[in-house]
Image (cartoon, rainbow, N blue to C red):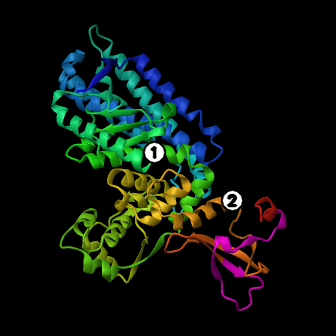
Amino acid sequence: MTDMILRVAGTVSLDLDWLEKLRKDFLTLLKNMPRIKDYQDGDKVREGIKTYKVRFYDLFFERFLNKHLKYGYADFGISESDAKYVEKKLRKVGWDFYTELSLPLPYHGTYMDEGTAFVRFKQDSPAWESRIKRKAQVFWKEVREVIEWVHQQPGRGLSVESPDVEIVSIEGFRVEVTGYTNEHADTMELFKAGLRLYKKQAASRMPILLKKQLPLLVTFEAHIDKGGEYHSRGGGEIEFFASGITNETPGRVAHILAHEMGHHLYKTVLGGEGREFWATAIGGNYGQLDLADVIRAWPGDAWAFELPKLLADKDPILALQVQAFTYDRDHGGNRNEMQKKEDFQALLDKGTKTINVPKIPISGYANKNSEEAFCEAVGLLVGYGPRAVHEVVRGWLDVVLPGQIRTAALSTLRVAANFLKTAGYFDVGQMVLFGKYKNKKAIIKAISVDDRGVPVVELEPVPKGRKQNKVLGLFNIWHADPEKRKSFGV
């Protein structure tokens, strides 16, 4: 396969010691609940619970119930009827526990900032914590009864085989490979080509990725419908699922790796000001799209996810806007029911003339929330090059990662950088000065970006009278407080 560093394999016994460790790991995660003081704390706990959930599903459902118990029950010293009894006793309680393993902290985005998401979390978390503790206790009880019942007779016991874990060096990256066999040779060659491409293009387009590179894991045995996942545990790592990259291209592998690295940069490098700028840029990047135009451009019986490829030469912007609309930002960014032409026609027939979409789309998946938008921009830039990311979006990237984006337009950057400098300085509701001599007063009503991605503010003149609100660039206003201006160097 490649240069070997270490190989590890073994068997996990599903005994009372295993159950106690599973229970203690779960309780350790819950002990962090009182320590969650803000959204960032909650995000870390959410990542920990997500990791626990993925590993629990892989071992308990994929390896034990769906494989070893179903086809290898004789190895446990039990009969087929015994295996069916264990299956019936454990699957439902296990699934009830598994489905609750999601911290009720909404992802922030266009319609919900971090503060609002955290308020909702504080409201929902007590009921969630009570509910998951109750389901966990039922699960522990049923598993304990099964383990004790199996061990009543000598020579019986439950276990799962852990796949071979090989720690190897691929293209200079340290990679932990799980479950690889010769049958996976083609996928491994694809993965190696993707790493080679990622290394080359990250160095020329976004070198900070290589400076902050995380350890990589590649899982060949699990069949999960996703290409990769970022884990924050232990300083961070990125996991690839071979089933999600089979038959893909090296560019897609590079895209996935850069996307998942984007989560690491977003959480550890951007900082509060950088995330605020990015969220504001994404939040101000929305406008109305005529449904009649969508229906006229829709090719045949195509699905929404096929539009970017089918309309690549005709109207790629519209294709991405429609694809973005199919991700519901109000419900965790999950796909909604708007997937076919007839779905949009039905919406038009009900009287809806327009839909709210990104004016400068990044990708459909980017519409989930502002963090995913950042990761998609990073992934597309590294995987497919500058042509895959709009110039304005490249400008936003350079603002939050100054000097690290080698293709951004300087004119956009100068204006956007000024906004980043003022992040935390101006806020909605504050009194400011504007006009040629900065002697006119106004109140900030909104902060957003215009069609070119330039940060702007909407001002309400004081006194209001019959005067209309004005929209100005951030560099055209001063803070009304002299002390604030002094601290800002004005």
Task: Work out which residue is located at the far bottom of the displayed protein and give it.
Answer: 466
Label 1, secondary structure: give it.
loop
Q: Is residue 489 visible?
A: yes
Q: Position of residue 417 (x, y in %)?
A: 59, 61
Q: Is residue 318 above or below residue 331?
A: below
User: Which quadrant of the structure image shows residue 377?
Assistant: bottom left
Q: Position of residue 444 (x, y in %)?
A: 69, 73
- Mark pair 1, 2: CA separation: 28 Å
Disc 1 and disc 2 in contact, CB within 8 angstroms: no
Q: On the rendered image, what quadrant is the C terminus found in? A: bottom right
Label 2, secondary structure: give it.
loop
Q: Which mark is residue 11?
A: none
Q: Is residue 100 magenta?
A: no
Front in this rendered view, residue 339 or 300:
300
Q: Is residue 460 magenta?
A: yes
Direction from residue 134 to residue 273 in the image, left or right: right
The count of marks equals 2
User: Which quadrant of the structure image shows residue 182?
Assistant: top left
Q: What are the residue bounds of the magenta stretch?
A: 459-483
Q: Is residue 301 above or below residue 305?
A: below
Q: Which residue is mark 1?
A: 207
Mark 1 or mark 2: which is in front? 1
Q: Position of residue 357 (x, y in %)?
A: 42, 71
Residue drawn 54% across the image and 40% down it: 44
Residue drawn 23% across the image and 23% down it: 82
Task: Work out which residue is located at the far left of the displayed protein and give it.
Answer: 183
